[in-house]
Amino acid sequence: MPFHAEPMFPGDLYDTTLRVAAAATTTADADADASSATWRQFLGLGWQAVLVAEASGGAGASLGDIAAIAEAAGRHALAAPLVERCAVVPTLLSHISGNPAAETLLGEIASGEASVCPVLAVDDVTPAARLQGGRVVLQGSLRGADLTEPVTHLLALVALDGKDALVLLPRAVLAGAARSYTGIDARHTTDIDVEGLALPEAAVLLSGAAVRPLVDHANAVGALLSCAQMVGAIGAMIEQTIEYLGTREQFGVALATFQALRHKVVEMYVAYENVRGMVRQQVTVLDGMGSALPGREVRRELALVKLYLAVTGRQVAETAIQLHGGIGMSRELPAARLAMHALACSQQWGDRFSQLDRLAADAVLH
């Protein structure tokens, strides 16, 4: 049963990322206070500049190019903040026009001088802020900051005097009360309490009614690219499972000869082809829209794709572990790390319950 997963968007970006990711050490082995060698390579290669317009010093490339990078990284379960730093933040900043601070930051991101972590929770724990004496004073908690690699800034969604706002916070905010967590795929996530933190008014990059649609769009881009990571992980899991079944013997014959196991692999393959086509189509749709924000139907399709990937990714991961037997529970096995990576990606940028809530809310409103 030979099988090789073909990339959704083949090309130099995919091939280069694949080579770098293959040589990467696990994040758990890295120094939490310094950039990993892999992340330094990505910065040097200009991956943060891919979606940045040429006028701001970037490559002005397409979402398909970032999807190629995400898929290749997913094939090696690379726990790096690629989606956050290379797609979500450039998407946000590129839609903020007329703000010198945002334009300067975009150029620094493209050159690798800055690396910005987005904190875009849109629930009732969004930090509150108020204008006081020409300063912006924050109160609350910044939840879910991916600090797997060091940052220079955080870009947070806050409620500024009752209105949505995007505020740029310096790295120094991390010195406050913080709770850090290590995920199953070795990502480092942090919740940061901010109590009376005062920032200059210029830290507000955008405020008002334009913020929420832009944040929703950035979250959707993050969700779609996390799906691209899962597509890469699922394809690699199938390859490794087929190789294992072809070499492992039971009762003197290869496991690959057992029909029940072959049926399981076929189910994995069908699921892979489905999700690969879905993600590729949605990336193509968003690319075709240029700088325009997606409408209701496109947002609905994106939510459905993330919902389907969240469920299917877990099913394929569990099947891969089951077909590997007891060794499938070992972190030393690449297939096990891929399974954990797929599960982690399914939770990022909205798990299946979040997507169901969005779909239900949309149905009620319309």
Image: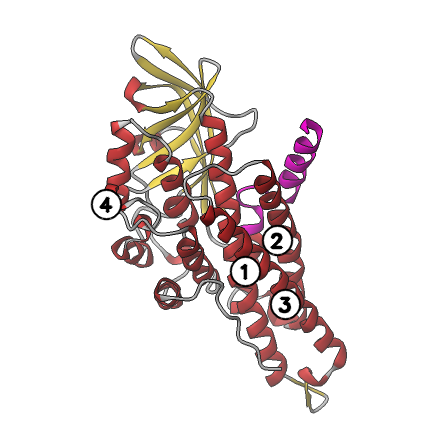
User: Residue at horizontal 51%, vertical 32%?
Assistant: 121
Mark 4 or 3, which is nearer the eye?
4
Using the numbered discs, state the Cα–Cα distance from disc 1 to disc 2 in whole angstroms. Answer: 9 Å
Q: Quadrant of residue 89?
A: top left
User: Residue at horizontal 63%, vertical 41%?
Assistant: 355
Residue range in magenta is 345-366
Using the numbered discs, state the Cα–Cα distance from disc 4 to disc 2 in whole angstroms. Answer: 34 Å
Q: Is residue 347 magenta?
A: yes
Q: Examine the rendered structure and indicate whether residue 135 appears above or below residue 345.
A: above
Using the numbered discs, state the Cα–Cα distance from disc 4 to disc 3 in whole angstroms. Answer: 43 Å
Q: In the rendered image, which residue does mark 4 sit on? A: 57
Left or right of residue 317: residue 153: left
Q: Residue furthest right?
A: 260
Q: In the rendered image, which residue does mark 3 sit on? A: 320
Image disc number at residue 309: 2
Q: Examine the rendered structure and indicate whether residue 253 appears above or below residue 103.
A: below
Left or right of residue 244: residue 250: right
Mark 3 belongs to which amino acid? Ala
Query: Measured from the top left, where is residue 104 in percent x and y?
Result: 24, 34
Using the numbered discs, state the Cα–Cα distance from disc 3 to disc 1 in whole angstroms. Answer: 14 Å
Q: In the rendered image, which residue does mark 1 sit on? A: 231
Query: Measured from the top left, where is residue 151 in percent x and y?
Result: 32, 41
Residues marked 4 and 2 touching at CB (< 8 Å): no
Q: Is residue 85 magenta?
A: no
- Quarter of the image where the C terminus is located: top right
